[in-house]
Image: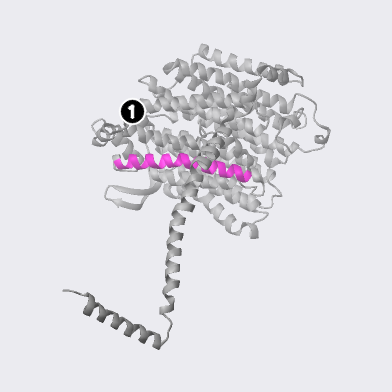
Amino acid sequence: MNYTTYISLIPLLPLISFVVFGLFGQKHFVRSAGILGTLILLAATVLAFYTAYQYFFVTGRVNGVYQPIEPLKYTWLQFSPGMSIDMGILLDPASVMMLVVVTVVSLMVHVFSLGYMKGEERFPVYYAFLGLFTFSMLGLVLSTNIFQIYIFWELVGVSSFLLIGFYYDRPAAVAAAKKAFIVTRFADLGFLIGILILAFYSGTLDFGTLIHRLTDTHSSQLAQITGTGFLGVSILSWALALVFIGGAGKSAMFPLHIWLPDAMEGPTPVSALIHAATMVVAGVYLVARLYPVYLIDGTILQLITWVGAISAFLAAIIACTQTDIKRVLAYSTISQIGYMLFALGVPAYGAGSNSGYTASLFHLFTHAFFKSLLFLGAGSVIHFVHTNEMGNMGGLRKLMPLTHATFLIACLAIAGIPPFAGFFSKEEILMTAWQHNKLIYYGALITSGITAFYMFRLYFRIFWNRSAAHNHVHHSEGPWNMKLPLLLLALAAVGVGFIPFAHYVSINGGEEISIPLGFSMAPVLLAIAGIGFAYVLYYKENDRPQKLATALGGLYKTVKQKFYFDEGYLFVTKKIIFNGMAKPAAWIDKYLVDGTMNGLGWVTTRFSASIKAWQSGSIQSYALYFFGGIIALAALFIYLWKP
């Protein structure tokens, strides 16, 4: 099998899964869809690992730098001699890394779902949707040009809509699917406009050519796009900001974060796939893909920095008050993606270092494993107790020993405790922030302590806190296909931090980030303090949390209500847009536009009714009208016409 063929099979295998199970699943694959879908994904994962091996260790590195490779590329739509939409596959360090992440996490979700979704009426449809999502995400990360990535970007949105709304008979799931779809569509409009601007001024859609033309200081395209402005801002800044809006919407960044917590209405394995490791990090990947262009515009990088930092802090604060375990993890995801984004942005505050790129993608890589482990662990708990609420849990460590151990590993990883994976990647982000912006660093440091607190609040309330309910004692922790992914992801959450990531994934050769031992003291001690505070409040059932909530009063209520963002959006949409704009527009449409047209129709109808007697079909009447007309004309010319 040649190079092009097996790489092409990686995204095509999940697509085959979608087509076969979508068309014939309910009739022919009711029992076998899960096994077949998992085997197909296993084949794609093996090919992804082989591609990564070939790229990183055999063919990709030339003169010490990993080169971009396009094993497949063909022109789909030709607009002009220099402008076309191509479809192809791009291999570079970032895309190959994402190739491994997407296939591994998707495979774990496929295996876990064999047990979790067993007995579902639409079991084959579920695996068809998983295949569509995996195909879309793989197509996104392998795209060779910015319009190809937009096509798969929208396919990811469609497949996430289908998966979030999988339980279409539940109003909450339908509402969540619509909310996610609509919010991200508004953001994607910005993305599309940004694409059109970049393509117009650069004269290309191809990533490599676009980046070269817009970063070469002698380029006429760069001079034109930076020399042209609108409202005092260069067109380049507008384009990059609009592209970032698309990424911020997909990655659920402030203020477009409102869709992600509600998206937890989908099946829990879907949350691990979409909202932990793949779809929500697409925004980070998009900025990273165009990072050389972003580096020349410090203003937009500062925007990215502050959006990421604010999102990380706000989401961490909100997570401290939520009681639905999946929503806690959803806000945790928003917070961690905020880390990735501000790591990309902080180099704007200092020259000479692109360490933020490597740190951000390293955290994306480690986060994929420990966050998918957290979601699948939460799925195991929900499968056991049949509820998402912490108040109905507690004391499950003895009844669910494997879930307990793996969940603890994931909590330690996200809290940044060494030697777990999250420690290494988060330390690189903190070091990058320290080198470029001390304010962002201290904010990130505080957020990391809050992260440790809310994650161990979750851990203690699930597995300790109080004795297990009597009706849980006779339950099983789950079949092997739910336990195996937890074990494998736990191993990854421990081990992937030791990978010399900067050696493989960097920009322009990159640089190793050296972390002095003393630098790590503050983050680790703060994380331990957060864990200790959670221990005091939640290790055993007591009234301290309630007393603290009462003491905080309105502040606690505001945070618990998620700072009323949803209510604010509802006020804007219902009171301002619907009542203030849509209703007057509807009145104008109904009474002025429709009224005018209806009035014209009424006049026409009445006029036709008054003259329709003239068309009687009677020859005598026509003869009478004819001679009457002749007499009238004769009288006109004889008596009234005076030449």
The answer to whether residue 305 is left or right of residue 82 is right
| Res. 240 visible in picture | yes
Residue farthest top in this picture: 518
Give x and y (percent) for residue 18. 56, 52
Give x and y (percent) for residue 407. 66, 29
Which quadrant of the rendered structure holds the C terminus? bottom left
In this rendering, the answer to whether 428 lies above or below 28 is above
Q: Residue at x 62, y 47 (%)?
A: 166
The main secondary structure of the magenta stretch is helix
In this rendering, the answer to whether 353 lies above or below 575 is above
Residue density around tag 1, few if under 14, some if 14–19, many if 20 or more, within 10 Å = some
Residue farthest left in this picture: 643
**Residue 571 falls in which quadrant of the image?**
top right
Q: Please tell me whether mark 1 sits on a helix, a strand or a loop.
A: loop
Q: Amino acid at mark 1?
A: Ile
Please report the bounds of the magenta region as a residue range.
173-200
Return the residue nearer the eye: 279 or 631: 631
The answer to whether residue 536 is left or right of residue 492 is right
In this rendering, the answer to whether 385 lies above or below 304 is below
In this rendering, the answer to whether 553 lies above or below 367 is above
- Residue bearing the label numbered 1: 296
Give x and y (percent) for residue 285. 45, 35
> Is residue 165 a member of the stretch shown in magenta?
no
